[in-house]
Structures are given as C-alpha cells and as structure tokens.
Image (cartoon, rainbow, N blue to C red):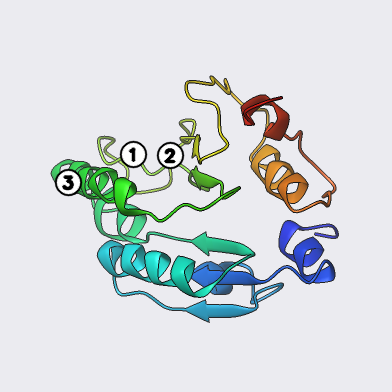
Amino acid sequence: PHGMLLDRLAEQHVPVYSIGKISDIFLERGISRHVKTKNNADGMQKTVDAMGEQSAGLIFVNLVDFDQLYGHRNDVNGYAGALEAVDAWIPSIPLKGADLLVFTADHGCDPTTPSTDHSREYTPLLVCGNRVKPGVNLGTRATLADIGQTVAENFGTRIGAGVSFLRDIQKGS
C-alpha cells in the first residue's frame, strides 16, 4: 500500500536491513540489504552482527522457527524452548542510544490448538531500549499499523495508518 513504512524510510534515505524472510514478505520494497537465515539462532546472531555493522537505520528481523517449526507443527514444547532461547538472548543485544527493540508478530500461530493454521489471538507487543520507560502498558492496540507509525515517528516520518505510541514510551515525555 502507498505510504508503507519501508517506502517512507527509503524516501528518507534510512537504511533498512532485512534479516530472515522480511525481504520476501515485502517483495524487497524499501530494503537496503538483506540476509537469509537458517533458523532462530542464526537470525539472532545475524541481528547482533547487523547491529555492530550498521550505525543507523531499521533492522527488521523475522525469527522463522516460531511459525515454521513450532506453531504450524503444534509443537508446544519446541515453541516454549524457542521463547526461552530468545529470552536468554535479549541481554546480549547491544542496544545503543535511541535504539528501540520491538518484539511482535504479524499473526498468531498457537501451537496448542488442533489447527495448524494461523490463529486469531492478539500478538505480543514488547518494547525496550535505553530511552524506553520500564513497565508501560501499551494495552490492546487497534492495529499492527500502530507499531509502523511508532517506528516511522522514531525516524521522523509518518505512514498512512496507525497511532504512534512513541511519546507514551519515551523517558522524559
């Protein structure tokens, strides 16, 4: 759609580093550089590597195992183990200055349901960073576009949909 976040960032000359299948999902629109991944561990390592290489811009990551290996396969224990691995990885993420780290999903994929299809539960929204107030409850958002609008505002631009929550989470605001 017109006004998509990645298009807006490209117009602003903001580099977008895609890790995993993001470039495929967005048909490479607005992507400056992309790397494929083998699994979540590879994606997490490539994220840390990208943060060391890239001084500015958006690093957009898809950790594919949640969907591909565990959600669609109804593997509750595998899903739980993958969540624990990501949780253990978080402290090693080299956040700098105004970096925002946003965890979410583009759809549900509940491994506890009998179906192997995407599911309709709310997706997580966790945001952290050096300038993020701890413990802010962002509530149930009306749309995933709220995340896009927040990222857009963080880079000084806007997109066509969503309500930014950047001011709600920034320290000193």
Q: Earlier in the sequence, mark 1 or mark 2?
A: 1
Determine which residue is flagged by label 1. Answer: 110
Using the numbered discs, state the Cα–Cα distance from disc 1 to disc 3 in whole angstroms. 14 Å
Q: Earlier in the sequence, mark 3 or mark 2?
A: 3
Determine which residue is flagged by label 3. Answer: 81
Q: Nearer the viewer, residue 131 or 135?
A: 131
Q: Residue at x 30, y 62 (%)?
A: 40
Q: Nearer the viewer, mark 3 or mark 2?
A: 3
Q: Nearer the viewer, residue 44 or 72?
A: 44
- Number of on-image labels: 3
Q: Nearer the viewer, mark 1 or mark 3?
A: 3
List x then y, in percent, for residue 43. Answer: 35, 66
Using the numbered discs, state the Cα–Cα distance from disc 1 to disc 2 in whole angstroms. 6 Å
Determine which residue is flagged by label 2. Answer: 119
Secondary structure found at label 2: loop
Q: Which residue type does callout 3 highlight? A: Gly
Q: Horizontally, is 78 left or right of 43 in the view?
A: left
Q: Nearer the viewer, residue 98 or 76?
A: 98
Q: Earlier in the sequence, mark 1 or mark 3?
A: 3
Q: Quadrant of the N terminus?
A: bottom right
Q: Quadrant of the C terminus?
A: top right
Q: Which residue type does callout 1 highlight? A: Asp
**Do we see residue 20 in this rendering?**
no
